[in-house]
């Protein structure tokens, strides 16, 4: 998470603008979660959890989360190496491939679920058309021209979908441990690790396709995924009340984090919001 542009300070107005964007994305994710619930329930019932290599026990769930963190770390190191070697096109191809593949599949499900309810005669056409449009918009943003409003709308929708997907298809314990694990990695990556190096190597390239604007601030796509995942998890596994409480907790953490940006140029966007969000969900589980 960073503040943009450099001369801007944290004010009530730009804080409210950023929070408004985040809340809007969270609400979209809740809508997607509710709409996709039957599809994802059927998938989990038939094939099991979407990612569960080490099982759903406490030890296995912790291992699952650590494996994903290691994967993210390795991918980021690879991207840093590409930018250091001035291999910008290769960097963009990898970012496009990773983002567009997941967004195409998830948008097929989301658009298909909505079309099935509101336009059943055109399910296939609408699902494929919307999914293809999302991929085209990602490609335009990465390879042609990065228009902030367009990339923000596109990546916000993708982040909402991915957060909803994780909430509905991961084992409950993995879904709770994963934000904690990525919060620790986020702090390391921003202050000492590869994310700081990635942004430092070529900020105008590194942020395209992996970040969006929330008012005067820049949020990483990963931040958005986890800001939406916990409220969606609470809605899917617990209740609307739990979902609202987790949203309030996460957004309070976002406000605290943004306030700290008055003293820092770059901060991890996950640790404080995720700590509060997980505690809010744990309140209903204990």
Image (spheres, helix red, strand yellow):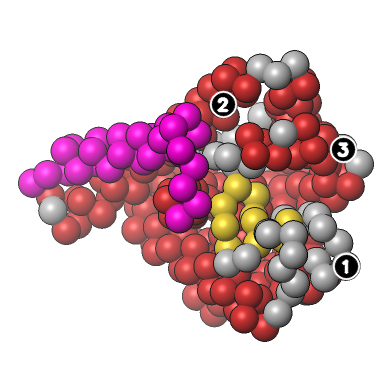
Crowd around label 2: few <14 · some 14–19 · many ≥20 (10 Å): many
First in residue order: circle 3 vs circle 2: 2
**Residue lying at the far front of the rendered structure:** 7
**Residue on which the image places disc 3:** 193
Q: Position of residue 286 (x, y in %)?
A: 74, 72
Residue 229 sits in quarter: bottom right
User: Nearer the viewer's eye, disc 3 or disc 2?
Assistant: 2
Is residue 191 visible in the rendered image? The answer is yes
SS of the residue under disc 3? loop
Q: Residue at x 63, y 75 (%)?
A: 14
User: What is the C-alpha distance between the residues marked 3 and 2?
Assistant: 21 Å
Q: Quadrant of the N terminus?
A: bottom right
| Relative height, residue 249 to residue 270 (above, below) | below
**Residue on which the image places disc 1:** 263
**Residue on which the image places disc 2:** 92
Is residue 284 visible in the rendered image? The answer is no
Q: Position of residue 280 (x, y in %)?
A: 70, 73
- Between 30 and 208, the residue placed more toward the observer is 208
Crowd around label 3: few <14 · some 14–19 · many ≥20 (10 Å): some
Q: Residue at x 50, y 75 (%)?
A: 240
Residue 262 sits in quarter: bottom right
Q: Residue at x 63, y 34 (%)?
A: 205
Q: Is residue 164 magenta?
A: no
- Between 122 and 176, the residue placed more toward the observer is 122
SS of the residue under disc 1? loop
């Amino acid at each position: 998470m960073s503040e943009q542009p450099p001369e801007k300070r944290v004010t009530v107005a730009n804080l409210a603008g950023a929070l408004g964007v985040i809340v809007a994305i969270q609400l979209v994710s809740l809508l997607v979660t509710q709409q996709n619930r039957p599809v994802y329930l059927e998938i989990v019932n038939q094939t099991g959890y979407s990612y569960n290599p080490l099982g759903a026990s406490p030890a296995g769930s912790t291992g699952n989360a650590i494996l994903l963190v290691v994967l993210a770390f390795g991918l980021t190191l690879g991207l840093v190496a590409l930018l250091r070697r001035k291999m910008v096109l290769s960097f963009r191809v990898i970012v496009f491939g990773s983002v567009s593949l997941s967004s195409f599949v998830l948008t097929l499900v989301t658009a298909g679920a909505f079309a099935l309810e509101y336009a059943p005669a055109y399910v296939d056409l609408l699902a494929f058309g919307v999914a293809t449009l999302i991929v085209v918009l990602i490609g335009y943003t990465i390879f042609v021209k990065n228009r902030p409003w367009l990339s923000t709308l596109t990546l916000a929708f993708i982040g909402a979908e991915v957060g909803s997907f994780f909430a509905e298809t991961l084992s409950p314990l993995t879904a709770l441990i994963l934000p904690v694990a990525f919060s620790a990695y986020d702090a390391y990556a921003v202050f000492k690790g590869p994310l700081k190096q990635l942004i430092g190597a070529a900020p105008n390239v590194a942020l395209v396709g992996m970040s969006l604007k929330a008012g005067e601030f820049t949020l990483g796509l990963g931040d958005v995924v986890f800001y939406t995942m916990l409220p969606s998890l609470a809605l899917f596994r617990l209740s609307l009340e739990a979902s609202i409480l987790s949203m309030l907790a996460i957004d309070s953490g976002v406000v605290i984090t943004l306030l700290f940006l008055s003293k820092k140029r770059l901060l991890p966007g996950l640790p404080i919001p995720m700590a509060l969000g997980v505690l809010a969900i744990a309140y209903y589980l204990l």
